[in-house]
């Protein structure tokens, strides 16, 4: 088997807004390259990329998929990344291990929200890019309008290197602006440039040549001297400009009709960088440094995805940056600080696995059943350990309470959630002690719905996702005194415990203090812990709506006892009873969690966002506009923003994002308090 490495590999990611035809394009690429024998459609649920049952059902990509193929003697490691924004973690992973990107734009819809987002991710990662204006066969397809939008949003460096011949039903082929030749149909038969396209072709070619000339001093001298460029000079100059991100070539085509796909493959081969043309960021204890990739260097491989497969077990995807990794070997996990045993290595294409003996620097593969390794870990040589810069994933912002459907589901729930959160770094699981709920956090509603369905399919665990309960608290506003005497006489030993408590409010965030102020032995010292235990149990359920009580100091200052009938349990009951009475007399109030929220939106949406926050009882703390983006900082009650991810996406057409963290507790307004109490009473009555 031919070895592929730094000299003959292209690692690239397919990016787009959801529905731009990216998965159809990946299918057409595999077919054109001879990796598959027939073209399948997304609507049929049979594409190589979307093999997951949930992807076939929803007709969207949910997971990144490896789709290697071969073109002109090079290996193309194509990664189809999801277009739906809820699965941004998969996109970030795919971008991290790629040198280049093909951004797919629909010729009818133009630049959409997802296009802007993936462009921003590519800029952040400094990926070299090619843009494909897809769906030229679609109704309302307009290549020139789409080019205008691309240049308006992303700058004049976005330049066509091809023009389409016709559109919609009349879409026939493309004109190559470098060679000034026309190619018709899926077989790319050479033809004359139609007169209808000639004027635009001349104009766009002149702009392209001017941009290419600016890359190289020798070329610009030739250009200013009025000399013609050879095709080789143009191609080399365009490659140099693409790799350095000074030009982003725009191509045209139709994935469904398989027109223009072979030219896209040529562009990937000719213009996108080789692995050896990108430095590796290595982090050691003192600093980060960029090193030249080398097959002869000690092993350095980054794990960019893990998948929990019920049949194969854990499947680990990795990219080799330096050195060589062999099947049936041992490597050092630099993050975990332990040896990891490597079994059989695979190259994946969709759901199929091809066993390989080794993978060299620049290549991507997978291995099953690693025990220690997780996403973001570096696999390396124990003699020369290194750490590759890890992947930065967005923090989850959308929460749901997870309830198992049956007792059997409850027993398996913890293990399933643990496996899925290990597989997906944008998932978080925690137990909310105040509400006794298991909270699953993700990027959005669809993300969590897919996770719940995955839990059922992979692990047989059925769950319901519900809006989480708000962890309200209760406290008092004025000092209060209370007395409680627990006395029972039922024959034989009786029961007697007598406690006097003084309650006083404390500042927010103080918690609960218990103080013993009993003097003169009015309550024997050995019964004081029982009083404290009774108080501590009683504060778990307040008198307004049965929420935990906080921010009070409880002093036991007096009481009495019976030498025969008193016991620990009696004073525990008396302590709890006295606290309940004291809480009722202390003008109790409800407290709610207040969150610090930071909303990042385009400036055009500032008014709508601030208005919406005001309806949610928020207090805007400040705004920081910069480069057309506004960052709005506010404090808002948690109860008002439990579904804010949905509201924000709706208000900003998906252009907004936010982060949120707990700040403090505040008093709930009276009218809302009454509503909460009524809901709690109704909830109790229904049990």
Image (cartoon, helix red, strand yellow):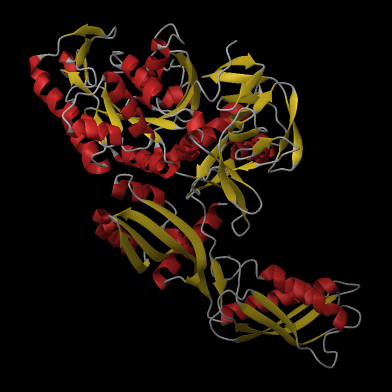
Foreground residue, 559 or 182? 182
- In the rendered structure, the answer to whether residue 231 lies left or right of residue 167 reads right
Task: Find residue 429 and report its horizontal and vertical position in percent.
Answer: 59, 47
Task: Find residue 427 and report its horizontal and vertical position in percent.
Answer: 55, 43
Q: Quadrant of residue 301?
A: top right
Tally of marks: 0
- Residue found 76% across the figure and 35% down from its top: 339
- Residue found 62% across the figure and 22% down from its top: 359
Foreground residue, 281 or 353? 281
- Residue found 37% across the figure and 37% down from its top: 244
99 vs 536: above or below:
above
645 vs 671: above or below:
above
Q: Quadrant of residue 523?
A: bottom right
Foreground residue, 495 or 348? 348
The answer, for residue 677, to whether it is visible in the render is yes
For the view shown, which residue lies furthest in the bottom direction? Answer: 520
Q: Quadrant of residue 209?
A: top left
Foreground residue, 586 or 217? 217
476 vs 648: above or below:
below
The answer, for residue 110, to whether it is visible in the render is no
- In the rendered structure, the answer to whether residue 126 lies left or right of residue 330 reads left
Name the quadrant of the N terminus: top right
Task: Find residue 51 and report its horizontal and vertical position in percent.
Answer: 49, 20
Task: Find residue 489 and report its horizontal and vertical position in percent.
Answer: 83, 75
């Amino acid at each position: 088997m031919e070895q592929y490495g730094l000299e003959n590999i292209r690692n690239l990611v397919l990016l787009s807004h959801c529905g731009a035809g990216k998965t159809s394009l990946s299918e057409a690429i595999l077919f054109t390259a001879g990796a598959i024998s027939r073209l399948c459609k997304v609507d049929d649920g049979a594409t190589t990329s979307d093999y997951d049952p949930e992807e076939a059902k929803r007709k969207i990509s949910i997971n990144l998929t490896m789709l290697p193929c071969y073109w002109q003697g090079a290996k193309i490691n194509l990664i189809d990344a999801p277009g739906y924004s809820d699965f941004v973690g998969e996109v970030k992973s795919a971008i991290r291990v790629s040198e280049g990107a093909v951004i797919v734009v629909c010729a009818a819809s133009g630049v959409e929200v997802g296009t802007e987002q993936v462009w921003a991710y590519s800029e952040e990662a400094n990926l070299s890019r090619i843009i494909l204006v897809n769906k030229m066969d679609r109704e309302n397809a307009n290549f020139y309008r789409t080019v205008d939008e691309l240049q308006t949003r992303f700058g004049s460096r976005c330049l066509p290197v091809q023009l389409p011949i016709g559109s919609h039903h009349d879409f026939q082929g493309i004109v190559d602006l470098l060679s000034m030749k026309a190619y018709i149909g899926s077989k790319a038969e050479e033809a004359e440039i139609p007169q209808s396209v000639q004027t635009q072709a001349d104009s766009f070619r002149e702009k392209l040549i001017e941009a290419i000339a600016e890359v190289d001093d020798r070329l610009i001298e030739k250009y200013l001297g009025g000399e013609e460029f050879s095709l080789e000079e143009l191609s080399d100059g365009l490659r140099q400009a693409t790799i350095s991100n000074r030009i982003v070539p725009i191509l045209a085509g139709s994935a469904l009709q398989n027109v223009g796909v072979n030219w896209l493959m040529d562009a990937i081969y000719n213009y996108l960088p080789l692995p050896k043309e990108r430095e590796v960021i290595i982090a050691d204890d003192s600093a980060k440094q960029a090193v030249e990739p080398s097959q002869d260097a000690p092993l350095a491989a980054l794990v960019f995805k893990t998948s929990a497969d019920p049949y194969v077990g854990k499947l680990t995807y990795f990219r080799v940056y330096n050195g060589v990794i062999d099947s049936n070997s041992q490597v050092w996990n630099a993050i975990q600080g332990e040896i990891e045993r490597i079994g059989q290595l695979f190259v994946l294409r969709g759901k199929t696995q091809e066993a390989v003996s080794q993978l060299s620097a620049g290549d991507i593969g997978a291995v099953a059943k690693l025990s220690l390794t997780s996403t973001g870990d570096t696999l390396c040589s124990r003699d020369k350990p290194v750490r590759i810069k890890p992947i930065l994933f967005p923090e989850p912002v959308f929460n749901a309470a997870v309830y198992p459907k049956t007792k059997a589901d409850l027993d398996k729930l913890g293990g399933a959630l643990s496996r899925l959160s290990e597989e997906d770094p944008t998932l978080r699981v925690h137990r909310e002690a105040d509400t006794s709920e298991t909270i699953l956090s993700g990027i959005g509603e669809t993300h969590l719905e897919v996770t719940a369905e995955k839990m059922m399919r992979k692990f047989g665990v059925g769950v319901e996702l519900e809006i989480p309960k708000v962890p309200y608290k209760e406290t008092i506003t004025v000092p209060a005194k209370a007395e409680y005497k627990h006395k029972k006489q039922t024959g034989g030993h009786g029961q007697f415990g007598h406690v006097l408590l003084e309650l006083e409010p404390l500042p927010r965030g103080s918690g609960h203090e218990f103080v013993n102020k009993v003097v003169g032995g009015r309550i024997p010292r050995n019964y004081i812990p029982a009083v404290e235990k009774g108080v501590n149990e009683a504060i778990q359920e307040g008198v307004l709506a049965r929420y935990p009580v906080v921010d009070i100091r409880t002093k036991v200052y007096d009481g009495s006892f019976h030498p025969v009938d008193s016991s620990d349990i009696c004073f525990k009951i008396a302590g709890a009873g006295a606290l309940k009475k004291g809480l009722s007399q202390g003008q109790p109030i409800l407290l709610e969690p207040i969150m610090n929220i930071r909303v990042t939106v385009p400036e055009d949406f500032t008014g709508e966002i601030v208005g919406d926050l005001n309806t949610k009882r928020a207090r805007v703390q400040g705004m920081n506009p910069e480069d057309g983006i506004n960052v709005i900082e506010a404090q808002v009650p948690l109860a008002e923003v439990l579904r804010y991810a949905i509201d924000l996406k709706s208000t900003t057409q998906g252009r907004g994002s936010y982060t949120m963290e707990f700040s403090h507790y505040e008093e709930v307004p009276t009218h809302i308090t009454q509503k909460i109490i009524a809901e709690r009473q109704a909830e109790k009555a229904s049990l």
